[in-house]
Each structure stands twice: as C-alpha cells, then as structure tokens.
Image (cartoon, rainbow, N blue to C red):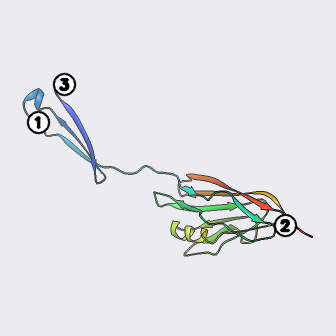
Amino acid sequence: MNAGEYITATVIDNIAQVGIDDTLAFGNSSGFSLNEIATALPAAPVNTVPDAQTVLEDTLLSINGISVNDVNGNLSTVQLSVTNEALNVALSGSTTITSGANGINTLTLSGDQTGINATLTSLTYQGTLNYNGGDNLTILSTDNISATDSDSVTITVSALLRA
C-alpha cells in the first residue's frame, strides 16, 4: 500500500467485507473488495451451576440450576458424579444414560442439548444412609470435538439429630 491508501473491514450479518480505497494516491478507486462469510470458531460447552447446596442427612435433595450451553450446537455428553451415594434423573426427549445408571454415584447423559438440559432439571442427590459431611457434585460436559467444561457444586450433608 502507498501513502493515502487505506483498508476498511466491517462485519455485517456475519459477512466480513474488506476493501482497499486508493483514491487519494491515484485519483480513483481500484474497486477491489472481498466479501467473506465470518464463521464462529469451535467453542467448548459452558456449564451453569448453582451455588453450594445443603441437605439434611438421609433426605433427598433436588438440585436445580444446572444447564449446559454449546454455542456450536454439538453437545454430546454430560457426566455427573458424586462421592457419597446416589444421583437420579428423569430422562427427557432423546436423552439416554450411556454410562452408569440412576441410583449410583456416576451417570453419563447423551443426547441433544435440549433433552440433556430438560433431564438436568430433574436431578436429585441422596447421600449414603446415615452419612453426614461434605460431598462434591462434578459436572463434565463434552461436545463432539472433545471440547469440555468441568464444574463442581459443593454439597453439605448436615447431621440428623437423634434422641
């Protein structure tokens, strides 16, 4: 480029437009322009999780506020795990449990983002009988290019006062 020339670049409706204006240098414009469709780069899924949870020993805890967003629309699996006993979900849409099972400490959900998120709204935790103390729910989301997001929710199981 010469003095007096400049390049412009704009993105409108996902189309990148690049132009060179050389009117100051040569008295006319070359008329050169390039239009290219701008595409989003692959991105990892993003988990949304609630704050720490507290439950009384031997009591069922509904865990609300977990969801996953993958802007590329290619969410593949969500693995849920705890240390002290059982997780349960009610499957929604085409979502399936592809590893683990309801009633144990780890399960993996497979399906589309809508079905997985609907299933996550039904998540419950039940600690081991007579257990009290800390536990940790880990959420590991993976898309079909193996990009991941991992988050955890602290669960405090409070002791039941017995006479």
Q: Nearer the viewer, residue 132 or 76?
A: 132
Q: In the image, is residue 98 above or below residue 136? A: below
Quadrant including the C terminus: bottom right
Quadrant including the N terminus: top left
Measured Cα–Cα span from mark 1 to mark 3: 13 Å
Q: Nearer the viewer, residue 85 or 133?
A: 133
Question: What amino acid is found at the position of numbered circle 2 in the picture?
Answer: Leu
* Disc 3 element: loop
Horizontal and vertical percent for residue 77? 59, 62
Q: Nearer the viewer, residue 60 or 102?
A: 60
Residue at 18% in and 23% down: 3
Q: Which residue is mark 3?
A: 2
> Pointer 2 and pointer 3: residues touching (CB < 8 Å)?
no
Q: Which residue is mark 1?
A: 29
Q: In the image, is residue 1 above or below residue 90? A: above
Measured Cα–Cα span from mark 2 to mark 3: 80 Å
Horizontal and vertical percent for residue 64? 62, 66
Taking the view exactly as shown, the residue that stands out farthest to the right is: 163
Question: What amino acid is found at the position of numbered circle 3 in the picture?
Answer: Asn
Taking the view exactly as shown, the residue that stands out farthest to the top is: 3
Residue at 19% in and 36% down: 20
Q: Quadrant of residue 24?
A: top left
Residue at 85% in and 69% down: 129
Q: Residues within 10 Å of mark 3 (few under 14, many from 20)?
A: few
Q: Which residue is mark 2?
A: 160
Residue at 83% in and 61% down: 132
N-terminal of the two: label 1 or label 3? 3
Q: Nearer the viewer, residue 160 or 128?
A: 160
